[in-house]
Image: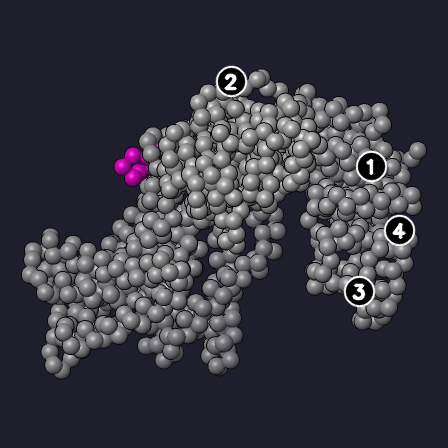
Amino acid sequence: MTSKMGTLQRHLRGAFQRSIGIVLSILAGVFVGSLIMIWYKQNPVEIYTLLLKGAVGSQRSIFIAMQRATPLIFTAIASTIAFRTGVFNIGVEGQFFIGAICGTFVGYAFALPTIIHLPLTLLAGFLGGAAWAYFPTIMRQKLGISEIITTIMTNYIATHLISYLTNYPMRASPTTTETPPVQATTRLPQFIELTRHWAKPLGKGTQAHFGIFIALAVVAIVYFIFKRTKLGYELRMVGISFPFSEFGGIHLDRAFIGGMLISGGIAGLGGIVEILGVWREYKNLFATGFGFRGNLASLLGRQSVIGSLVAALFYGAMEAGALGLEWAAGIPRQLIDIVIGLIIFFMAAEGMWDFVKRIKWVRAPEAARKSTQELEV
Amino acid sequence: MAIAVEMRGIRKEFPGVVANDDVDFAVEEGEIHALVGENGAGKTTLMNVLYGLYHAEAGTIKIRGQPVQIRKNSDAISLGIGMVHQSFKLVSSFTVAENITLGAESRTGIFLDRKTIHDNVVEISERFGLKVDPDARIQDLPVGVQQRVEILKTLYRNADILVLDEPTAVLTPQETRELFGVIRSLVHEGKTVVFITHKLREVMEISDRVTVMRDGKMVGTKVTKDTSPRELARMMVGREVLLRVKKDKAKTGDIVLRLENLKVRDDRDLMAIRGISLEVRAGEILGVAGVEGNGQRELVDAIVGLRPVVAGSVHISGEAVTTLPVRGRRETGMSCVPEDRYVRGLALPATVEENLIVTGYHKAPMSRAGLLNSKEISNYANEAIKTFDVRTTGKDVPASTLSGGNLQKVVLARELSTHPDLLIAAQPTRGLDIGSIEFVHQRIVDARDRGTAVLLVSAELEEVMSLSDRIAVLYEGEIVGTIDAGKATEDGLGLGMAGITDEDEPEAKEAGHD
């Protein structure tokens, strides 16, 4: 009992050990990304410098990164909730859109004071996303159809349903495929709108908006749910082991459906927040891919709540950087998707990082674990 | 006789625990030396120090009288030490010969000399009577043969001190006998064998001398023929071990569990329980004996609520629970130690605390209005860990870091701390060592004495006989007889388990139901 480590130190070491694989994956992704750049006769150092500048190089780029990250935080958290409950929700994309269109409808069809209108619009977004997640969930529960298939399918249905809605019943004017704009009472202010008259306005030339605060609140709430509530415990246990949960008396169906509905709801909330903050009206397919990138960000964040937040911010910054890259050097921003893809690829090859754990200063917590194993009576 | 291995004052620490504390250990040349102790006593650690896998903080090692420094694995190998680990280190897609020579291949230029390799392997396996086909792939071989390959690997590297780490844990009785033959022939060829185990029967059968370790310390070394299993068990556990449970006569009360003409199907949809009726009273243990696969699993599942009942009914404390879900049944005072503790009994990636609260988290005092009360929960967890003597570095470590015996204690703590009216215990000691088995048995008897009705389902006849007050024999989904444990004989039960209900066995004919 001589070398007892402090709790804080143990936690820090644990966090360090968990993140070292991610850091190495990022480095490996960046490295292979540079090989691809060299192949296309580009200078990777130059590109990454531009990328970094575009991501965090100025106040403006930071606000762009924030704007890009906001919807990703929602979709990443939505994916994480599903993952942790043991479900693969690839339907985040569709739930995001359905939430957006439902919220948009409440946003333009009613005229109410902000204090009622805004929450109501957000609620409509949440419920829309949750409802959209309900179909695959119930198909899995009652018919045993894999949610991976059905959530992909409901994404297509969502896309075409919305295409119909924006082309016909919800169309603002005969010449567009947009809905009418949402009422001023339910918009989320952009930073620039509020600080335009300041000596140094915030977020100039960006559409970064207050939705980021809703996103952060959602992160906090979900974190709390997982750590401190009965529901969170049920979701986590069901996610870890069905037989154990069933044996312990947890109602599997309820946990499942609950997890999926919250996941879909948060995806839908992300959709409507994006509308209220950036677009203010529903343009058909205003922003595709947030759902899928949310799935990826969740994987990148090791399916933890805080990890997903960090990953979404990272992903947002990379996208902001990629935009800058496109403007400054004409390099397609899909390049950054390749780099992210590579990073996740390397993370998936987890065994690769095992050798790192053999290094002594990384290994200490593992040795502690091993020794407990030998502690049998 | 010359000393092959002499270890003195070995100390090895891991964060938070001393695995080897000033250990002295000596093996004579040409002997079979058993190294025994319970799981976690430090046997494997000590041998890993010898084999150069761990580096001791203190202590000296002499091999054949020469002081040596073993800094790394290859030092130990070049000193003629070989070790066969509990989990084999073989490449399953390679052939036997390739595995044996891997890392020590004969080469011509940059190419492997396959012929020499093949011949060498054949020569060694013949010399030691370890028959294997050098060209077979590991993945196609049974476990016993894979183990032989591991032994050949050490011999190929000219080991003459062989350490076998719990070699029989993965073997069938048949394979164990063959392994013992191999070990004897190795010693006959002048090799020295250290044999790690916690099974006393094997110690008595195979070893010349035996060294006992406990809690990282050396307890003592005995000449095998001058000692007894009883003495060794006492040395291992540190106190007198009850090889048979002590219990008073049961004071039975009301009927707690009643099954009426229960019929249950198995996973293949075949009838596994074909109409069972039985009763268990408060304060008694009803043992269900039977060869595995005669419906035990389905019976337990149906009582716990994990498997639908085709016909018949389950009553707990007078209440019909046949259609209730698991939680509903638990609310009536049922609890269960499940057969597959790693699948149902525990969620290994979850923390010890999370494992402890799964049956009680949903109600006061552990939660209120949907919120978990972390203070209550951690008090409860700490209390359970203390009461059931769970050896863990804390309640917040993943359950996967605990050893098998401690994991079963976690399950017991959870299932017994509610003081249930009914306990279903399915194979409660499978895979545990002596100390843990005794602990589990004692807790089950304690529960009985507090008035819990216990249904014990076990494939270990000895366990059923020593714990039960009454014994029911299950054969092909039916109870072929129920008798008082006092009247039961191993032979009589054995016949029942084999489906033979001879007229000459009047006890086994006693009515199985009300």
Q: Is residue B181 left or right of residue B384?
A: right
Work out whether residue A52 or residue B514 is closer to the camera in this orientation and state it: B514
Look at the image and say whether residue B456 sits in the magenta stretch: no
Q: Callout 1: residue from which chain?
A: B
Closer to the chain start, of discs 2 and 1, is 1
Q: Report the residue marked by disc 3.
A: B135
Residue, x 35% and y 76% (percent of image)? Answer: A326
Q: Is residue A139 left or right of residue A360?
A: left
Give the amino acid at mark 2: Lys
- Disc number placed over residue B128 in the picture, else none: 4
Visible residue check, residue A309: no
Give the amino acid at mark 1: Ile
Relative image position of residue B45 (x, y in whole percent)? 69, 39
Relative image position of residue B132 (x, y in whole percent)? 82, 57
Closer to the chain start, of discs 4 and 3, is 4
The span shown in magenta is B366-374
Label 2 and label 3: CA atoms lie apart by 64 Å
Tell whether label 3 touches label 1 (CB within 8 Å): no
- Disc number placed over residue B206 in the picture, else none: 1
